[in-house]
Amino acid sequence: MILGNTVFRNKIKIWFLHSALVVIGCWILFMPSMVKFQKGANNIFTVFLNDVEVGTLESREDAYKALRMARRSISDDTRELTLATSNIAIQGSNIIWGEVQTPSEVAEKMAEVLNNSKKTTLARAYSIKINEYSVNLASIDEVMKLLSTALSKYDTENQYDVNLVLDPGREVNVLTTQVLSKEEVKREEEIARTNMPEAGFFATISEIVNEATPLAYDKDFSDYKLGLQSIDFADKIEIVESYLPDDEITDVASAIDEVTKDKETNQIYEVKSGDTLSSIALEYGLTVSDLIAMNESLEDEYTRIRTEDELIVTVPEPELSVSYTVESYYEEDYEAEVQYIDNDSWYTTQTKVIQEPSAGHRKVVALISYTDNNEDSREIEKEEVTYQAVPKIVERGTIVPPTYIKPISGGRLSSGFGKRSAPKKGASTYHKGVDWATPVGTAVVASSSGTVTRAGWGSGYGYCVYIKHPDGRETRYGHLSKVLVSAGAKVTQGQKIALSGNTGVSTGPHLHFEILVNGSQVNPLNYLN
């Protein structure tokens, strides 16, 4: 009996042991959280993200799968581009027993690490480049608002639309602008909708009609379609999609203000006949002092300017300019063009008015082209004169007058033209010329070609030379030490006529120089080239 019980208990133990081994084997083989033993190969992988341990997985593939899941999870809450540091490291090991996690569990831990190392979120934006200027906006709607606002300043009746099209001159996807009238857009939509192009006989007839020259007739003022005829941007516009930090994106109101408001821009102005510094300054809203400050060639307000000289002026311009054409009707008083009669025996400085002008009056339809608020051109399409203008008729000389040069080389300007304190007894308090201090014996040359009318002693002038010039002017040279020409001699510009000195009423070695116009002394410095 005892032996039977012992055998029974042994059988029970063996059965229990077998059952336990089966259960353990099944648990090892089929439970996903336990690693499977693989002889000679890594069977468990510890994963680190940005040097932070985030879990253990069965394979390297699971580690990268978890990283992809983590990246998706941190960007699912935004449509924008998110940047975060994601340096992954994987350490493999070969063990008999160990617990592993699922990729989704590791991905949760990875997401926490990525959020902590997130650099920035780059928002989708649109960069607009206008010449050298650029601005970034948050959406294509804001781009369209900016462009439409720039046009609306001149398209007050909203007749035109801005479209964005691919720039055919660029290989990459760069957008540019196309401005079409609403009538053109409607016409193109109608053609696209009907999709019925003309063909055969009807196409030929249409082509003949379109190419035929219309019969000429005298259009009445009421036949013209006045107002805006065309409009476009005057600057090249390029638009590209980009991803940028929020602080680099400009709000649309600020962008509109930056792009459309006038800014002072330097331009070159070519001097025309009749211009003065004050008239040029007035035209551009400047002061004469402003002009002098901007142009090194201008010493002061008395600096002479000549036709075709170039001066820097400032002109108000926006970053984005708009060019447009307007057909306008107006009535105006007008001046007839001046008529000139050439006189080959006069200098170009001599003129005489033969007939005084009188303004006329006319009705006009003109096609006027502008860039922003500046008129570029004006083409008169119809003109009806109410009464004719009487032209101004001017007789003018054709001979170029002689020029005048400084009569010595070097020298220091020691006394200018005009009122002064008498430098010594007997000297005048009103200086009728200019003085250059220079050593005795300095060469004195003729300022311009002419005929010597006096050469010798001249009382207060000491030794002096007078020269009469073809334009009626006269030059005088005083306080000389030696005279090298005689009265009646013909001299050329730059010819040596004397040596400087200290004769007559003089306070020291110098040359006294005068220019007389119509017998009266003028400031020589205003006439020297």
Image (cartoon, grey):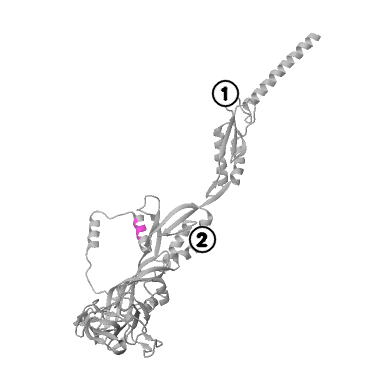
Position of 480 relative to 27 (above/below): below
- Quadrant for the C terminus in the image: bottom left
Residues 263 and 495: in front is 495
The quadrant where residue 213 appears:
bottom left
**Could you tell me residue 235's position as x and y percent?**
38, 62
**Could you tell me residue 108's position as x and y percent?**
61, 41
- Circle 1 crowding by C-alpha within 10 Å: few under 14, some 14–19, many from 20: few
Mark-to-mark CA distance, 2 and 1: 62 Å
Q: Does the magenta segment cover residue 118?
A: no
Residues 158 and 508: in front is 508
* Magenta extent: 187-191
The mark that comes first in sequence, 2 or 1, is 1
Seen as rendered, the residue at the extreme right is 2
**Mark 2 touching mark 1, by CB under 8 A?**
no
Q: Nearer the viewer, mark 2 or mark 1?
A: 1
Asked if one can make out residue 287 in the rendered structure from this viewpoint, the answer is no
Asked if one can make out residue 96 in the rendered structure from this viewpoint, the answer is yes
The quadrant where residue 377 appears:
bottom left
Disc sitting over residue 40 in the figure: 1
What kind of element bears circle 1?
Answer: loop
Q: Mark 2 sits on what residue?
A: 251
In this picture, residue 507 sits left or right of residue 202: right
**Could you tell me residue 420's position as x and y percent?**
40, 86
Position of 60 relative to 521 (above/below): above
Three-letter amino acid code at disc 1?
Answer: Gly
Residues 260 and 431: in front is 431
The number of callouts visible is 2
In this picture, residue 135 sits left or right of residue 233: right
